[in-house]
């Protein structure tokens, strides 16, 4: 484990992270909880960041007051981001509907035989 390489306190950190001397049920529960809660924490921080940015405005490195060039966030940037999001989702749906097997492995279409192990078991392309 990478934490065990930390001098003096590495083993103690590993035991704390794992919840014992090995990976067990407590470890899996901790990591599952972390992976479930962490996106909500990030979403909260992004919303908080946008609220502060909207209230105070962005800092200008030149120190000039540039209220003349400011564009309101809503509806301009909201609309721009929404149109981009809808376009990308539509493109993904179109690709999935027109050619659903484009990213599939050809080996998946071979009839399964429980008596023979395939000669080359490999992970999917994205692994």
Image (tube, rainbow, N blue to C red):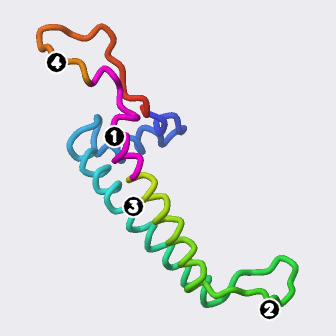
The mark that comes first in sequence, 4 or 1, is 1
The mark that comes first in sequence, 2 or 3, is 3
Relative image position of residue 93 (x, y in whole percent)? 38, 53
Q: Nearer the viewer, mark 2 or mark 1?
A: 1
Magenta region includes residue 125 = no
Q: Quick one: label 4, few (<14), some, or many (20+) residues within 10 Å?
A: few
Q: Is residue 115 left or right of residue 75?
A: left
- In 3D space, how far apart are the residues under numbered discs 4 and 2 (Cα atoms)? 67 Å
- State the extent of the magenta-drawn residues as a range: 94-108
Is residue 98 depicted above or below 102 in this figure?
Answer: below
Q: Nearer the viewer, mark 4 or mark 1?
A: 1
The mark that comes first in sequence, 4 or 3, is 3
Q: For residue 100, which numbered disc appears in the image?
A: 1
The mark that comes first in sequence, 4 or 2, is 2
Q: For residue 68, which numbered disc appears in the image?
A: 2
Is residue 104 depicted above or below 40 in this figure?
Answer: above
Q: Quadrant of the C terminus?
A: top left
Q: Nearer the viewer, residue 10 or 52?
A: 52
Are discs 4 and 2 less than 8 Å apart at CB? Answer: no
Q: Quadrant of the N terminus?
A: top left
The residue indicated by pointer 3 is: 38
Is residue 83 depicted above or below 72 in this figure?
Answer: above
- In 3D space, how far apart are the residues under numbered discs 3 and 1 (Cα atoms)? 32 Å
Q: Element type at marker 2?
A: helix
Relative image position of residue 124 (x, y in whole percent)? 37, 28
Q: Nearer the viewer, mark 4 or mark 2?
A: 4
Q: Residue furthest left?
A: 115
- In 3D space, how far apart are the residues under numbered discs 2 and 1 (Cα atoms)? 49 Å
The residue indicated by pointer 4 is: 112
- In 3D space, how far apart are the residues under numbered discs 2 and 3 (Cα atoms)? 39 Å
- In 3D space, how far apart are the residues under numbered discs 4 and 1 (Cα atoms)? 21 Å
Q: Nearer the viewer, residue 3 or 73?
A: 73
């Amino acid at each position: 484990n990478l934490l065990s390489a930390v001098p003096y306190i590495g083993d103690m950190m590993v035991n704390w992270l794992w919840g014992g001397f090995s990976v067990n049920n407590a470890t899996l529960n901790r990591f599952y909880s972390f992976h479930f809660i962490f996106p909500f924490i990030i979403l909260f921080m992004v919303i908080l960041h946008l609220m502060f940015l909207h209230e105070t405005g962005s800092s200008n490195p030149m120190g000039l007051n540039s209220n003349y060039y400011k564009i309101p966030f809503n509806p301009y940037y909201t609309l721009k981001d929404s149109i981009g999001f809808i376009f990308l989702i539509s493109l993904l749906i179109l690709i999935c509907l027109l050619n659903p097997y484009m990213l599939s492995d050809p080996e998946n279409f071979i009839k399964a035989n429980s008596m023979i192990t395939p000669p080359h078991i490999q992970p999917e392309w994205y692994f």
